[in-house]
Amino acid sequence: MHKVVLKAGREKSLLRRHPWVFSGAVARIDGKASFGDTAHVVANDGGFLALAAVNPDANISARVWDWNETTQINTAFFHRRLETAIGMRRTLFPRKPDEAERLVHGESDGLPGLIVDRYADVVVLQISSAGCHRWREAIIASLQQLTSARALYERSDADVLELEGLTARAGLVRGELETPVVHIMESGVHLQVDVAKGHKTGFYLDQRDNRLQVGELAAGRDVLNCFSYTGGFTLQALAHGAASVTSVDSSAEALQLGREHVRMNAFAEDRCEWVDADVFQYLRKLRDQDRQFDLIILDPPKFAPTAATAERAARGYKDINLLAFKLLRPGGLLATFSCSGGVPADLFRKIVAGAALDANVDAQVVNQFHSTPDHPVLLAFPEGEYLKGLLCRIN
Ligand code: SAH
């Protein structure tokens, strides 16, 4: 068995069951361990710590499969892990066949570098680690068996792949798909998901429950949905009787799909405005035009993937939150989110507090948001808790 030997004193995070081994903690990698091989991670004194997949050239040198020395890493192992992940959702959060859900959430489901999303009867997988790349065929075979999907589509084309030394790979891997646009239902609304060209695996499933909760507050209100993508929040707001919804995004294709969604659901098109713009600039324009809203949603992309980029990200969050507070009518609500792993929840709250202060408003937090629960967070892996949100009300 290959061995990853840690430097003296660097076993602490593994003893706490954190599943990553950073290259800085590694003294040497014994044997001829190459990309994706299974190895024993051992302390400097040789004591066993974990079974892991090796990636000798990456910043994360090894990702843990299991903490038990006797576990066999083979096709049956992957089948069991996938069965457990899918079974947990079936028991705790059953979803209808025409809905969408996350079936596998990487490290938090014991499968580092694997994301699996189900869009109705189409399953999309994303592999972003050397270890899952090595076991790709076994994973695909098990997924087909466990989900009985009409089609399996691969979207291993995220930016993070490069860090791991993987080349992008996307396309149909099993079954048939006459069009990559899949119809799903979400909390009663019709949606289309382009599994070939959509962001991530096609849609932002982590916000599903938050879209519903925020939408339920929209009745009779003028809503501004910033970073709308294909209109997930917009549609829930319309479904719950919003007076008007202005949706802003810089992706013309996303906005086009958003407009189609309004028609598909037979919502009033004259209550909707779709704006192709940079949110940072457009918020200033709205301010200069003295426009006002009763409910504003800010769901920006990841400004800070890592802690190192947190400071620049903080300035971005402060800017849009400050402008949004200023555009609210008295009694207005701001649903503000951050999906930056590098910005923890307490820092995000401080940034939003600073924005309220500078906007000269008194704001109360009336609710807090997290990822929808089919995106579990392994307690030993706080990085899994990347999405956080606050619902603020101003007087
Ligand atoms: N709220 C959406 C997901 C938003 S993802 C949902 O529930 O589905 C972030 C979106 O921000 C993407 O659609 C991206 O196109 C858009 N975006 C990124 N930077 C932007 C900018 N500076 N101005 C406007 N839109 C931007």
Image (cartoon, rainbow, N blue to C red):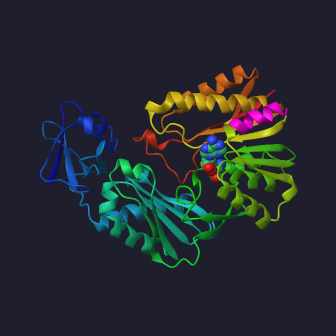
Q: Is residue 37 left or right of 169 when viewed as pictured?
A: left
Residue found 54% across the figure and 54% down from its top? 374
Q: Is residue 218 left or right of 26 when viewed as pictured?
A: right
* Quarter of the image where one finds residue 388: top right
Q: Nearer the viewer, residue 40 or 198?
A: 198
Quadrant holding the C terminus: top right
The stretch of residues the image draws in magenta is: 281-290
Residue found 47% across the figure and 32% down from its top? 309
Q: Position of residue 159 (x, y in %)?
A: 44, 50
> Does the magenta portion include 227?
no
Classified by dominant secondary structure, the portion drawn in magenta counts as helix
Q: Position of residue 228 (x, y in %)?
A: 68, 49
* Quarter of the image where one finds residue 303: top right
Query: Taking the image as drawn, is residue 287 in sight?
Result: yes
Q: Nearer the viewer, residue 12 or 32?
A: 32
* Quarter of the image where one finds residue 12: top left
Q: Is residue 328 above or below residue 233?
A: above
